[in-house]
Amino acid sequence: MNYDKKTVLVTGGAGFIGKHTVKSLVDNGFDVIVADRKEQPSDLNCKYYQVDVASDEFENIFKENLVDNIIHLAALPSVADSIAMPLVDCHDNYQATVNVCTTAKKYGVKKIVFSSTAAVYANPQYLPVDEKHPTSYLSPYAITKNASENFIKYCGIDYIIFRYANVYGVGQDAFGEAGVVAKFFDLMTQNKPVQIHGNGKQYRDFIYVSDVAKSNVLALQTDVSNEIINVSTNKKTSINDLFEVLKEELNYTIEPIYTESRAGDIEKSILNNGKLISMFDFTPSIDIRTGIKTMIENYKQQGAYA
Ligand SMILES: NC(=O)c1ccc[n+]([C@@H]2O[C@H](COP(=O)([O-])OP(=O)(O)OC[C@H]3O[C@@H](n4cnc5c(N)ncnc54)[C@H](O)[C@@H]3O)[C@@H](O)[C@H]2O)c1
């Protein structure tokens, strides 16, 4: 089935990955509707519903529009928040997904693209982690993402489940827990000290947000469906390396402060992206230094972290 050039509902479209995804969809000729709890951001020019996607009002979107496909990004994307507020996590991650799927089924939606996470692999048994690796959990966030994946598979609509590595880039909230790059960037551009949890040798697979947005669009431009696919670079960057790149690019001179490790944090994560490359003929190509340089360019233009 060709899912291209159809109306796409993007849940969480006012968020960090959402805004980049909406822009890529519009650039590729899709008609886009956004559903998000936030007020409509001034830089998001598309049909917009301010709504909790776990609520009954969510269905109004389908009564008023023909929705062909859904990119489901709305979530509480924070491990720390999920530990502090597991019921909110359950609402925004699992209940929201169940509501999106059951409503989508009722109105004949063709495909759901879901934003899952490397957190479902917990502390990996081998690296780089491929999609066959068993799932587990270190946090409520991983539990509700895993349950959401299963509900999507259960509900009987064509799907692509993407498991994103650590996403970073322009527009990420520096105050949320999800973005270590955004947090460091914000502090370092203000010449404030940075805290590194643990010894900084823990490493991640950092993927630039426009590569994630491109994957979301490709999921609707191909007939690949009913697959779980890592969205990642297959490259490791330690938190110490990340700090060094930012330090060099920003001419920052303050030494980091090392503190206790945090509960729920994964120690080492790199995701194998072979399936993404072979199924979508797409290799995420923006390395960490290039991504940070893009953030610095944007920072200079905006005159502030944005
Ligand atoms: N940022 C990352 O590194 C990363 C990594 C893996 C997976 N993900 C997943 O990608 C998706 C997008 O993440 P992000 O970084 O853009 O987060 P974000 O917080 O910037 O965006 C999420 C958006 O969802 C909205 N939202 C949350 N709950 C809602 C609800 N019940 N009803 C309506 N709107 C709701 C928020 O208002 C927000 O605009 C999430 O599902 C997240 O779990 C992100």
Image: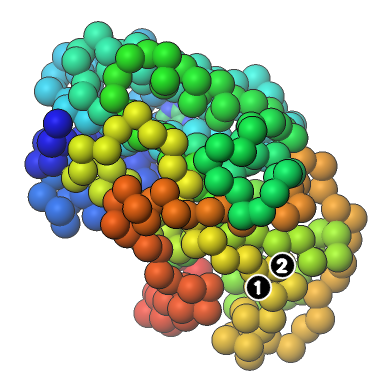
Q: Residues within 10 Å of mark 1 (few under 14, many from 20)?
A: many
Residue at image mark 2: 239
Residue 89 place in picture, x, y as percent? 61, 27
Q: Residue sitting at 20 percent across and 13 percent down?
A: 107
Q: Is mark 2 on a helix, strand or loop?
A: helix
Q: Residue sitting at 40 percent across and 63 percent down?
A: 284
Q: Residue sitting at 21 percent across and 24 percent down?
A: 110
Q: In this view, does 277 lie to the left or right of 7?
A: right
- For residue 97, which quarter of the picture? top left
Number of the label disc, if any, that sits on residue 71: none
Are the residues at dot 1 and dot 2 in contact (C-beta closer than 8 Å)? Answer: yes
| Mark pair 1, 2: CA separation | 5 Å
Q: How crowded is mark 2: few (under 14 residues within 10 Å), some or many (20 or more)?
A: many
Residue 45 place in picture, x, y as percent? 20, 49
Q: Residue sitting at 14 percent across and 31 percent down?
A: 1
Identify residue type, mark 2.
Ile
Q: Is mark 1 on a helix, strand or loop?
A: helix
- For residue 263, which quarter of the picture? top right
Residue 147 place in picture, x, y as percent? 56, 21
Residue at image mark 1: 242
- For residue 51, which quarter of the picture? top left
Identify residue type, mark 1.
Leu
